Amino acid sequence: MNSFSFTPCPSALTWENPPQAWKIEQQTLSITAGARTDLFTDPAGTVVINSSPRAIFSPTDGDFLFSAKVEVGFQSTFDAGVLMIYINAEYWAKLCFEYSPQRQPMVVSVINRGVSDDCNSVVIDGNVVYLRIAKIGKTFAFHYSLDGRYWHFVRYFTFGIADPVRIGFSSQAPTGDGCTAIFSEVAYTQTTLKDTRNGE
């Protein structure tokens, strides 16, 4: 099944790259990425990978907040659960809960405008965090939270093009045999974020 409905999202989700496994249970989405899957374009131009499974949908017109509680079964370096923005293979962005080479869960963001701009943000104690994407006019903001109420700033950016975006969920296992990410407490709200820095 290439398209499916998920109650918290305003339109049907479509798979870009199939997952190894997935399921919906009690408004919780689980995505298992297969081995050596990722979405990344090395700035040096030596590596281009577009194999990670992602379930994406078209948001409603206007500004929005899109968030989820993300739990990841970390095993290998760069395993991650991801909220993402996807325009095409050249323009996309992902907010990741990722396993670092130091074996620490981290909030990581990647903005791709032809090549990837990769940035590590903060170490998280445990395998659960809340992630959020905000659209404000032509710009976007990434935040994370430990409790789903108080949000910390990660990134503020724009793509510089007017093409419509899709948003959604992904998991990845760039170096390992697979990774399962579980997305719960998913919320999509048509509203404008008042302050990108403090997340309110």
Image (tube, helix red, strand yellow):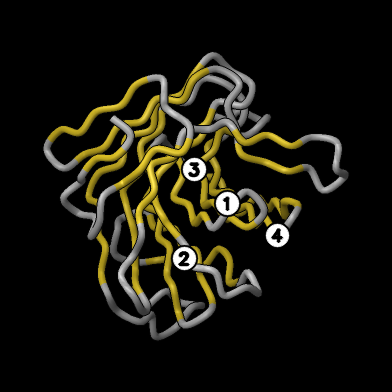
The crowd level at tag 2 (other Cα within 10 Å; few <14, some 14-19, many 20+) is some
Q: Position of residue 134 (x, y in %)?
A: 42, 70
Which mark lies nearer to you, 3 or 4? 4
Q: Secondary structure at mark 1?
A: strand
Amino acid type at circle 1 is Val
Marks 2 and 4, how far apart at CA = 24 Å
Q: Secondary structure at mark 2?
A: strand
Marks 1 and 4, how far apart at CA = 23 Å
The residue lying furthest to the left in this view is: 26
Q: Position of residue 87 (x, y in %)?
A: 54, 58
Whether residue 38 sits left or right of residue 185 in the image: it is: right
Between 70 and 6, the one nearer to me in the picture: 6
Quadrant that contains the N terminus: top left
- The residue at which mark 4 appears reads as 113
Q: Earlier in the sequence, mark 1 or mark 3?
A: 3
Whether residue 102 sits left or right of residue 27 in the image: it is: right
Q: Are marks 2 and 1 in contact (CB under 8 Å)?
A: yes
Checking the image for residue 97, the label placed there is 3
Q: Residue sitting at 39 percent across and 85 percent down? A: 194
Q: Are marks 3 and 4 in contact (CB under 8 Å)?
A: no
- The residue at which mark 2 appears reads as 152
